[in-house]
Image (cartoon, rainbow, N blue to C red):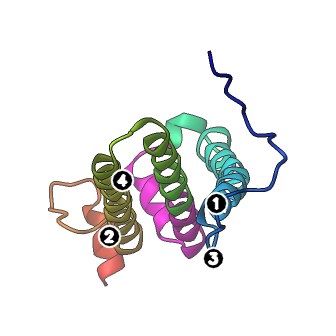
Amino acid sequence: MASVSIADPRSPQTAPRRRGANLEKWGWIYMRASGVLLVVLIFGHLFVNLLTGDGIHQIDFAFVAGKFATPFWQWWDVIMLWLALIHGANGMRTIVNDYVSHARTRTVLVWALWLAAAFLILLGTLVVFTFDPCLGVTESSSLWEMCQDVAS
């Protein structure tokens, strides 16, 4: 029976190193940095929404409309959206790379992940920055008076 030897883990690589950016390293760094920022953004979001004012009872359409009327909260939510979607897509990409062995299937799944993330980022950003609480309000709506005051 022939013996199989395993190379020492600290021995020099036999395969030539690729030139250019190490995308896996930058993905790893992004996951750590975005994770820390997301903890701050999410807990800030939860604190303002659930612990200030009337707590959970204050959250309704008017509360969201009020938050989206200020650039600070628009940017807070957009940054949280972008970081979370890219963080999640990168995590899913790692899982696909680890568990999908067929190269073409892996490529298709990774492309689908990034396309879905890009679409959701675009859609979410548009919603936050183009949100208009008076769009489509009729006279029977409880927002009618407020929207009439804003229009005049």
Circles 1, 3 touching at the beta carbon (< 8 Å): no
- Graded by Cα atoms within 10 Å as few (under 14), some (14 to 19) or many (20 or more), the crowding at tag 1 reads few
- Mark number displayed over residue 23: none
* Residue range (magenta): 59-81
Q: Position of residue 95 (x, y in %)?
A: 48, 40
- Mark number displayed over residue 19: 3
* Main SS category, magenta section: helix
- Graded by Cα atoms within 10 Å as few (under 14), some (14 to 19) or many (20 or more), the crowding at tag 4 reads some
What residue is pinned by disc 1? 15
- Mark number displayed over residue 132: 2
Disc 1 residue type (three-letter): Ala
How far apart are the two marked residues, 2 and 4, measured between alpha carbons? Answer: 30 Å
Q: Along the polypeptide, which appears first: circle 2 or circle 1?
A: 1
Disc 4 residue type (three-letter): Leu
Residue sitting at x 55%, y 75%: 71
Q: Mark 2 or mark 4: which is in front?
A: 4
Residue most toward the right? Answer: 10
Circles 2, 1 touching at the beta carbon (< 8 Å): no
- Mark number displayed over residue 113: 4
How far apart are the two marked residues, 1 and 4, measured between alpha carbons? Answer: 30 Å
Q: Looking at this view, is 107 or 57 the one in front?
A: 107
